[in-house]
Image: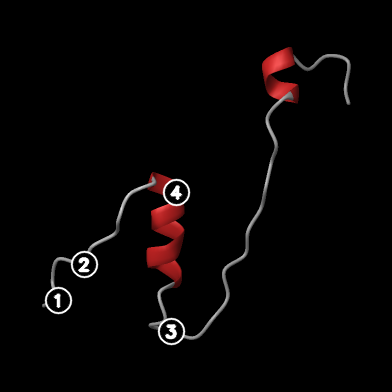
Amino acid sequence: MAANKSKSQSSLALHKVIMVGSGGVGKSALTLQFMYDEEYRISGRC
C-alpha cells in the first residue's frame, strides 16, 4: 500500500465487473440494479 494514501482511501476495496451475454437478456438492468440499489423498471413495456 502506498504511504501517501489517506486512511479512508486505503479502507475501500475496488472491484471491477464485466457483464457479458446475448442481447436482451438483462445485462443493463442487472448493472443498474447494483449501481443504484433500486429496482429497474422499463416504462415502455406492459
Query: Which residue, given by chain and number where applicable, does mark 3 sit on?
Result: 23
The label shown at residue 42 is 2
Sequence-first disc among 2 and 4: 4
Residue 2 shown left or right of residue 27 in the figure:
right
Sequence-first disc among 1 and 4: 4
Q: Pointer 1 and pointer 3: residues touching (CB < 8 Å)?
A: no
* Badge 3 element: loop
Q: How far, Cα to Cα, is label 3 from label 4?
A: 20 Å
Mark whose residue sits in front, 3 or 4: 4
Residue 1 shown left or right of residue 32 in the figure:
right
* Badge 1 element: loop
Q: Pointer 2 and pointer 3: residues touching (CB < 8 Å)?
A: no
Amino acid type indicated by mark 1: Arg
Q: How far, Cα to Cα, is label 2 from label 4?
A: 16 Å
Query: Which residue, given by chain and number where applicable, does mark 4 sit on?
Result: 35
Coordinates of residue 14 in the picture (x, y in percent): 69, 41
Rendering quarter of residue 41? bottom left
Amino acid type indicated by mark 2: Ile
Name the foreground residue: 29 vs 38. Answer: 38
The label shown at residue 12 is none
Query: Which residue, given by chain and number where applicable, does mark 1 sit on?
Result: 45
* Badge 2 element: loop
Amino acid type indicated by mark 4: Met
Which residue is pictured at 40% across the width and 56% down the height? 32
Mark whose residue sits in front, 2 or 3: 2
How packed is label 4: few (under 14 Cα within 10 Å), some, or many (20 or more)? few
Coordinates of residue 44 in the picture (x, y in percent): 13, 72
Coordinates of residue 4 in the picture (x, y in percent): 83, 14
Q: Pointer 3 and pointer 4: residues touching (CB < 8 Å)?
A: no
